[in-house]
Image: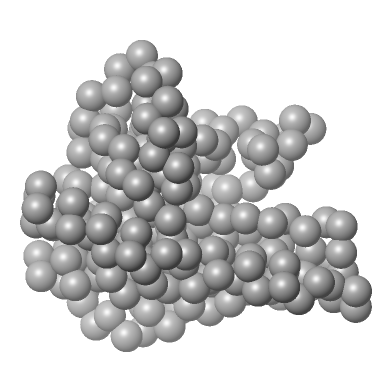
C-alpha cells in the first residue's frame, strides 16, 4: 500500500512513517523543509520503502506538487496521515489571545488538513479504498475547553468536526476516516516531561491506518478505544 504522512521529518509523524514502512508499506514522508526530511531519513538504520517529499500543508502549490509526485510514481494513495500540527499555545488564553497566532494555527491544524483530504480523496475514491487518520488531541474534546491554549484547542475541535463531516459525505464503504489523540508524547511540542514515548504515541495512528474493511469511521480514538468528542 502507498502511504503519505505529513509532518514526518520528526516526532510522531516520523515514527508513524517508520512503522508503516517496517510493515511493508511504501511511505512518503511529507516534510515542509526537504533538507530536514532527507536528514531524518538518513538517520534511520533501514530506510527502505521510504521517500521524502516536500510538503507544506499551508501551501496549495506544495500540496499539488506532492500529488503529482505520488500520481506519477504510483497512481494511487491508500493511507493519508494528517499529522502536521503547530502552536500548543500555553502562553495565552481565549481572553487575551493574539488572533493572528490563532489564524496561523488554524491554517495548519484545520485548513491544511482540509485541503489535503480534498486533494487526495479522489485517488482513494478512484481505487475504492482509503484510510485517513487526522491526528487530533484531547485538547480538542468538549470537556477540555477551559479557555486555555485557544488556538490549538479550537483548531482541534474543528478538526474533529471536519472528520465527522467528511465521514458523512464520502459515501464509500471502504474509505475510513478517523481522528486520534496520541496522548501526551515526548516530542518538541509535548516536552521531555510527557508520559508517553514517540512509539507509544504512534501506535494507535498506525493501527487506524490499517483498519480492516468494515472498520469504524467518523470516530475519535485514544489507545485504540473510542473516546468522547
Q: Which residue is found at the position 29% from the left and 28% from the top?
A: 22
Q: Which residue is found at the position 42% from the left and 73% from the top?
A: 114
Q: Which residue is found at the position 48% from the left and 77% from the top?
A: 162
Foreground: 25 or 102?
A: 102
Q: Which residue is found at the position 31% from the left and 49% from the top?
A: 4
Q: Specify the quadrant that holds the N terminus.
A: top left
Foreground: 14 or 105?
A: 105
- Describe residue 223's horizontal placement relative to residue 145 as left or right: left
Query: Would residue 141 be visible to someone looking at this image?
Result: no
Foreground: 55 or 77?
A: 55
Query: Taking 166 as reference, is 60 above or below it?
Result: above
Number of numbered tags placed on the structure image = 0
- Describe residue 206's horizontal placement relative to residue 151 as left or right: left
Would you identify the image quadrant in which residue 48 lies?
A: top left
- Describe residue 190's horizontal placement relative to residue 47 as left or right: right
- Please say which color scheme the image uses: one colour
Query: Taking 172 as reference, is 22 above or below it?
Result: above
Percent position of residue 21, x then y: 28, 33
Query: Taking 81 as reference, is 193 above or below it?
Result: above
Q: Specify the quadrant that holds the C terminus.
A: bottom right
Task: Give the residue furthest to the top.
Answer: 45
Would you identify the image quadrant in which residue 121 lies?
A: bottom left
Percent position of residue 140, x then y: 66, 67
Would you identify the image quadrant in which residue 148 lies?
A: bottom right
Query: Would residue 73 be visible to someone looking at this image?
Result: yes
Percent position of residue 149, x then y: 79, 64
Percent position of residue 2, x then y: 20, 47
Amino acid at each position: 500500500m502507498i502511504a503519505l504522512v505529513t509532518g514526518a521529518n520528526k516526532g510522531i509523524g516520523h515514527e508513524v512513517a517508520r512503522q508503516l514502512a517496517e510493515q511493508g508499506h511504501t511511505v512518503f514522508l511529507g516534510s515542509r523543509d526537504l533538507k530536514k526530511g532527507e536528514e531524518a531519513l538518513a538517520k534511520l538504520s533501514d530506510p527502505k520503502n521510504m521517500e521524502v517529499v516536500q510538503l507544506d500543508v499551508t501551501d496549495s502549490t506544495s500540496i499539488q506538487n506532492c500529488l503529482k509526485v505520488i500520481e506519477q510514481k504510483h497512481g494511487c494513495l491508500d493511507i493519508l496521515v494528517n499529522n502536521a500540527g503547530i502552536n500548543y499555545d500555553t502562553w495565552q488564553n481565549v481572553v487575551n489571545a493574539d488572533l493572528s497566532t490563532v489564524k496561523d494555527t488554524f491554517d495548519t491544524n484545520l485548513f491544511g488538513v482540509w485541503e489535503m483530504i480534498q486533494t487526495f480523496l479522489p485517488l482513494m475514491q478512484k481505487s475504492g479504498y482509503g484510510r485517513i487518520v487526522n491526528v487530533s488531541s484531547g485538547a480538542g474534546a468538549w470537556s477540555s475547553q477551559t479557555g486555555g491554549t485557544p488556538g490549538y484547542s479550537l483548531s482541534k475541535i474543528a478538526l474533529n468536526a471536519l472528520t465527522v463531516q467528511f465521514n458523512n459525505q464520502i459515501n464509500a464503504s471502504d474509505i475510513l476516516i478517523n481522528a486520534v489523540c496520541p496522548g501526551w508524547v515526548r516530542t518538541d511540542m509535548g516536552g521531555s516531561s510527557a508520559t508517553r514515548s514517540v512509539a507509544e504515541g504512534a501506535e494507535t495512528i498506525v493501527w487506524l491506518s490499517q483498519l480492516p474493511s468494515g472498520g469504524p469511521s467518523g470516530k475519535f480514538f485514544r489507545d485504540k478505544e473510542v473516546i468522547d468528542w
